[in-house]
Amino acid sequence: MSHCKSLLVHCMDFRFMKGIRGFLDQNNLTGDCDLVSIAGAMKSVSDPDAPISEKEFVLKQIGLSHDLHQIKHLILMHHLDCGAYGGSSAFESIEAEHERHLADLNKGRDILKAKYPELEIKLVLAKLDENADVSFEYLD
Ligand SMILES: [Zn+2]
């Protein structure tokens, strides 16, 4: 079984596809990174109201990447205006939206750190500008 360096867990949202490809290229991850593309990314892991089967599904995908490909790095990526969260309009302010994603990403990281303490986990928040270009903010 061959190995790869990293796993990126990100939202399936098509608007971010080009940006994520650039992100992978810039970080030297193209061809060396598993991808889990799922609506809301870590939302169902972090949200106590999400069905347990959804949480387990996401954790299983991450576990498979870890066990089969021996990943060393894990990138958990959320994005602003995420449909799984009801979009930006579901929040009172951009700050509140930012805070919710940071909280959910941190919860997800805590759960995964407990299972895989040796993994290096990075948190990233993506956003679209008015030209539909994607930028990335590292949250740690
Ligand atoms: Zn999304």
Image (cartoon, rainbow, N blue to C red):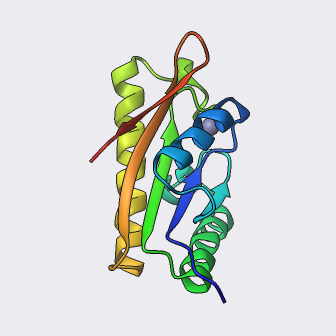
> Between residues 9 and 52, which one lies in front from this camera angle?
9
> Does any portion of residue 34 appear in the rendered image?
yes
The answer to whether 29 is drawn above or below residue 17 in the figure is below
Percent x, y of residue 13: 69, 37
The image shows a total of numbered marks equal to 0
Horizontally, residue 53 falls left or right of residue 134, namely right
Most extreme residue toward the top is 130
**Viewer-proximal residue, 86 or 16?**
16
Could you say which quadrant of the image residue 65 lies in?
bottom right
Q: What is the x, y in percent for residue 56?
A: 62, 71
Name the residue rendered at 42%, 28% in the picture.
97
Please identify the quadrant where the N terminus is shown. bottom right
Position in image of residue 116 (x %, y %)? 40, 79
The residue depicted at 33 percent of the width and 23 percent of the height is 95
In the image, what residue occupies the spot 56% across and 74% down? 4
When asked about the image quadrant of residue 64, the answer is bottom right
Point out residue 114 in the picture as x, y percentages from the top left corner. Answer: 35, 77
